[in-house]
Image (tube, grey):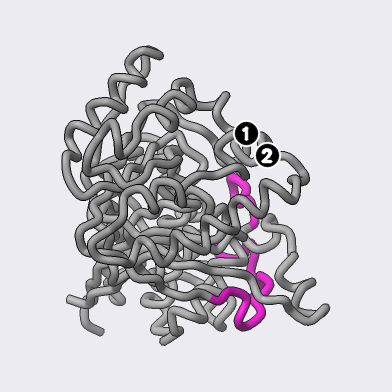
């Protein structure tokens, strides 16, 4: 049998985008890339992993512990293929920083979905792969944006009691924690996802709008950011966010963009106020960097759970980034800046 090679490329994502907590996601131009070769004549098993780029020193190289290859194995086993093929070599290059609110775990999961689909020649649609993603990631915003591309809104379908119980299977059963002596028989019968868990729509995005990611050089764990949120909200705060989200999804598609409409529509009372103690300087930045102080700015918000700050702008991107970096520097925090584009193609597999 012939040697086979293909590339999996997955964009990073930003979620929430102001008032859109757990609802909207944005696909951006930093990528997680897997260069994969499969040599059917090889006796080598399991897959061999190597990493370069962001987080390379921390990424597990054991395919039974690595999130991407565990996800791939889950997809394979849910579709009747119990083992990785022989002779798989995966070279990973990562541009997405870990723990910064740019969807690194979502990108790893989506890369695993496409990897499993390709290795098993399963022919699953992206919509069906999304079902598998939501058994692992459990929140649709990042994985939907990474898989489908663009600016998207998503929700989880109300399922039948039987399918709800399948969706609510503990994550430890979907992706078991493989022990040190794990082998090809470990976790052999995972629960398959119900069909149609997640639904999404792609919103428009005005061509003039550029994205600035200001990335502080420290991590905020998703678990810590989630635990900072209250169990319930006032009706006033929920209405505040719903009103703004309804305006924002249309305002970001209009050309030319209206900076004052977008800036006000990106305000939030659901997650940013409760996470400000995790990110020094955040309240000052959100209050002081405005379209009046920085012409060209459209809006500013936390990216996901942070600490990355996302600024949308048409002009003066460098000046906007410099101001935000200076505010962080007052807190003795260094930042990296990325000037990004919104990507529309989503995750892709290219056969060579």
- Percent position (x, y) of residue 264? 45, 47
- Identify the residue position indicated by label 2 in the image: 229
What is the crowding at mark 2: few (fewer than 14 residues within 10 Å), some, or many (at least 20)?
Answer: some
Q: Main secondary structure of the magenta part?
A: loop
Looking at the rendered image, the quarter that the C terminus falls into is bottom left
From the viewer's perspective, tell me whether residue 344 is left or right of residue 315.
Answer: right
N-term mark: 1 or 2: 2
> 341 or 292: which is nearer to us?
292
* Residue lying at 28% horizontally and 71% vertically, measured from the top left: 345
Specify whether residue 189 is painted magenta. yes
Q: CA distance from mark 1 to mark 2?
A: 6 Å
* Res 225 quadrant in image: top right
Looking at the rendering, the stretch of residues picked out in magenta corresponds to 176-199
* Res 12 quadrant in image: bottom left
> 112 or 321: which is nearer to us?
321
What is the crowding at mark 1: few (fewer than 14 residues within 10 Å), some, or many (at least 20)?
Answer: some
- Identify the residue position indicated by label 1 in the image: 274
Q: Does any portion of residue 6 appear in the rendered image?
A: yes
Circle 1 sits in a helix, a strand or a loop, which is it?
helix
> 281 or 243: which is nearer to us?
243
- Percent position (x, y) of residue 297? 27, 42
Specify whether residue 258 is painted magenta. no
Q: So how many labels did they put on this image?
A: 2
> Do callouts 1 and 2 mark residues in contact (Cβ within 8 Å)?
yes
Q: Is residue 207 above or below residue 237?
A: below
Q: Does any portion of residue 51 appear in the rendered image?
A: no
């Amino acid at each position: 049998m012939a040697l086979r090679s293909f590339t999996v490329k997955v964009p990073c994502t930003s979620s929430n985008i102001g008032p859109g907590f757990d609802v909207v996601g944005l696909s951006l131009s930093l990528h997680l890339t897997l260069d994969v070769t499969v040599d059917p004549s090889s006796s080598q098993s399991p897959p061999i992993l190597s990493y370069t780029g962001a987080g390379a020193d921390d990424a597990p190289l054991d395919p039974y512990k690595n999130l991407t290859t565990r996800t791939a194995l889950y997809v394979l086993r849910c579709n009747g293929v119990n083992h990785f093929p022989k002779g798989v070599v995966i070279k990973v290059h990562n541009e997405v920083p870990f723990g910064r609110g740019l969807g690194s775990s979502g990108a790893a999961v989506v890369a695993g979905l496409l990897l499993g689909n390709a290795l098993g020649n399963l022919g699953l649609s992206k919509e069906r792969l999304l079902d598998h993603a939501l058994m692992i990631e459990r929140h649709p915003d990042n994985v939907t944006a990474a898989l489908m591309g663009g600016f998207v809104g998503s929700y989880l379908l109300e399922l039948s009691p039987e399918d709800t119980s399948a969706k609510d299977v503990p994550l430890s059963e979907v992706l078991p924690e493989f022990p040190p002596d794990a082998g090809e028989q470990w976790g052999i019968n995972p629960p398959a996802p119900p069909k149609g868990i997640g639904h999404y729509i792609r919103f428009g995005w005005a061509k003039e709008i550029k994205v600035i990611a200001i990335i502080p050089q420290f991590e905020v764990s998703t678990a810590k950011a989630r635990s900072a949120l209250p169990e319930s909200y006032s009706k006033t705060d929920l209405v505040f966010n719903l009103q703004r989200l309804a305006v924002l999804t249309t305002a970001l598609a209009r050309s030319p963009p209206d900076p004052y409409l977008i800036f006000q529509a990106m305000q939030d009372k659901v997650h940013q106020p409760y996470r400000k103690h995790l990110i020094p300087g955040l309240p000052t930045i959100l209050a002081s960097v405005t379209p009046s102080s920085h012409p060209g700015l459209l809006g500013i918000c936390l990216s996901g759970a942070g600490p990355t700050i996302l600024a949308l702008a048409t002009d003066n991107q460098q000046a906007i980034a410099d101001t935000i970096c200076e505010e962080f520097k007052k807190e003795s925090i260094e930042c990296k800046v990325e000037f990004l584009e919104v990507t529309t193609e989503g995750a892709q597999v290219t056969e060579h």
